[in-house]
Image (cartoon, rainbow, N blue to C red):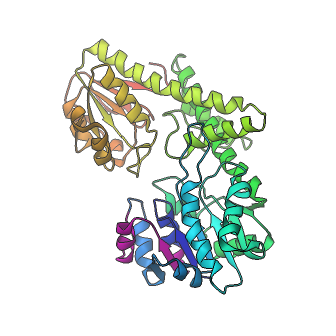
Amino acid sequence: MNISVIGLGKLGVCILASLASKGFKVIGYDINKKTMLMISRGIAPVIEPELHEHIKKGIKNLNVSSDFNELVIKTDVSIFVLPTPSKANGSFTDEYLKSAIQPIAEALKISKKKYHLFVVASTLSPGTMNKSIIPFIEKHSGRKLNKGIGVCYNPVFIALGSVIRDYLNPSLLLIGESDKKAGDIMVKIYKKVLLTKPHFGRMSIVSGEIAKISLNSYITMKISFANTLSSICEKIPNSNVDDITKALGADKRIAPYYLKGGLPFAGPCFPRDNKAFAVFAKEYGCEASLAKATDVVNDEQVNHITDLIVRNVVKTKIKKVAVIGLAYKKDTNVLDESPAIKVIKLLIKKKIQVVVYDPLAVDNTMKMFGDELEYLTSVKECFEKSQLVCIFTVFDEVKQINNSYIKHKPTVVIDCWRAIDKNSLKNIRYVALGRAK
């Protein structure tokens, strides 16, 4: 089977490169011509670990094209990876997805192909495929579902900064299929690509839509529960949130994943999927009270961290605060819903000077704040410029912090992930989330 990937953003290009490196002939298309040009030259168009290596490995199997007839004639499967921005009410729009599907469907209509599989990897509000996307494909292709076209809803569970690793090593593959034939094709593709043997969750298309946002909503609940434990532990001497969550996670009914007190959940998926879950439930007369409470706890954690910083600024009369880590997580430059960015905005409102460092996200942060912030080039420089250093992200350099970094007496370190050993450092006042002072 040959495959076309439509939409070459941070996820789409990783799917394209992974398929090509595993031996599939793949054609990519994106509305951004610069992205297509870079891929055709073997250059990764976005920052993502392992992407360049997979493009290089699969370059002989990789092509790009703006000819939709070619995309249909030369491929058997089209995977659509388009943004589905949130509407004002929290549900997702399918406009970009439809704009990408239409020319492929129209090219299929004039072709002599007997069958083509449409695979949607974008996150959608439950019911969108059956109510909107499938009728749209039928209209523009002139074909009926399962009689010339097959459709699968196949969202992938990845995190920016580890997209390719997550894509190739899943524990779950979710396939909402229009019929067994469509699902069988996807299973066949994945069995050639994957490095693991995951559970194949094959189900109806609408069940697949519900499962996707349900899974992300459930994960956010685990994160907010761990953060609630973290806040409690800060009030109780000799308690340690890491000891508690490690014990809880050892119970097979709970599992350790995402059960770590620290920063609020963030990024382009978790916050919006949790809101969309509540909206979807409301549409069918159900109240998703847990999902709503999860968002409340998440917002409270931003305010809690801000208050912690402000209290230490007032107490020590420190003039500058250094923030280490700007992206919503390590190994990416994405700022979507970043806790660090939210905290910085609150600090600026309080007239507190802020200096910042992130190995990947400084440029994007500079576009947002301009000269409101001072931009540094290393963790060590953060300690040189400020007596109060707040660790939001645990880069490798953070783990290397030692006494040579400490330039001021005293230095206050606020450690959101309990990443450094306070006993190995002199002349610091150490404040950790999840631990009493």
Q: Magenta part of the protein: which range?
A: 19-45
Query: Which quadrant would the C terminus be assigned to in this image?
Result: top left
Residue nearest the viewer, comparing 427 with 383: 383
Looking at the picture, does residue 265 appear above or below residue 35? above
Q: Could you tell me which residue is drawn at 73 percent across and 74 percent down?
A: 143
Res. 20 visible in picture: yes
Question: Which quarter of the picture shows residue 290?
Answer: top right
The residue nearer to you, when weighing 48 against 396, is 48
Position of residue 80 measured from the top left corner of the image (x, y, whole percent): 57, 65
Q: How many marks?
A: 0
User: At 62% from the left edge and 72% from the top edge, which residue is drawn?
Assistant: 105
Please give left or right for residue 299 compared with residue 407 in the image: right
> Residue 136's image quarter?
bottom right
- Give residue 321's quadrant in the image: top left
Residue 127 placement (x, y as % from top left): 73, 51
Q: Position of residue 57 (x, y in %)?
A: 44, 78
Quarter holding the N terminus is bottom right
